[in-house]
Image (spheres, rainbow, N blue to C red):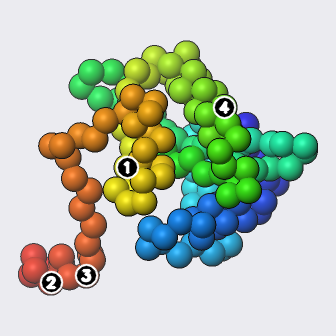
Amino acid sequence: MCTEKALDVLADVYVKAYASVDVGEKWDQESAHKLLQYWLKRQPDLFFLAETDSKIVGGFVAGIKPWWDGNHLVDGEIFVDPGYQGKGVGSELSKVMFGTAMEKYGARIWDAFTFRKPDFPKGWYQKLGFKEVKEWMMISGDLENALEILGK
């Protein structure tokens, strides 16, 4: 499990992981640290980190959300230092996260967003048996613009 002391190192790993793929998100140390600190406060028992040779090389964070069919594991963020990708780090983190969510919270479903392109990580999730939910889509927008449209 993660501690406050590990957040600076984890933020570096997070920044490196996103910099290694072109998905349009430009994380820096400060923004990554804030996100990870949010997760540590939100659900500390579902914040796991991976270490290799006493070096932090990845993390997996998620939350539990009650749903109509039971608890779901949601909003997950899994990230691995690019130098350690393809070596089973993500798989091990997933085993710990999924096992803990099932055992501790009775979760049976994981709902998460991923990128359509590039193929990684989408292809990796598909190898684990996860499927795209065709009926869902992610929306995002400017709040100020929405208020203007609503007539404040």
> Closer to the camera: disc 2 or disc 4?
4
Q: Are marks 1 and 3 in contact (CB under 8 Å)?
A: no
Position of 108 relative to 140 (above/below)? above
Spatial CA distance of label 2 from label 3 is 6 Å
Amino acid marked by disc 2: Glu
> Closer to the camera: disc 1 or disc 3?
1
Disc 2 crowd, CA 10 A, few/some/many (<14, 14-19, 20+): few
Residue 146, position in %: x, y? 18, 76
Amino acid marked by disc 3: Glu
Q: Please identify the quarter of the rendering in which residue 8 is found.
A: bottom right
Residue at x 80%, y 50% (from the top left corner): 56
Q: Are marks 1 and 2 in contact (CB under 8 Å)?
A: no
The local secondary structure at tag 2 comes to: helix
Spatial CA distance of label 1 from label 3 is 24 Å
Residue at x 48%, y 49% (from the top left corner): 121
Residue 82, position in %: x, y? 68, 58
Position of 1 relative to 17 (above/below)? above
Residue annotated with mark 2: 148
Q: Are marks 2 and 3 in contact (CB under 8 Å)?
A: yes
Task: State which quarter of the image contains the C terminus.
Answer: bottom left
The local secondary structure at tag 1 comes to: loop
Residue annotated with mark 1: 113
* Disc number for residue 144: 3
* Disc number for residue 53: none
Q: Nearer the viewer, residue 59 or 19?
A: 19
Disc 3 crowd, CA 10 A, few/some/many (<14, 14-19, 20+): few
Residue annotated with mark 4: 92
Amino acid marked by disc 4: Glu
Q: Is residue 47 visible?
A: no
Apparent side of residue 131 relative to residue 28 in the rendered image (left or right): left
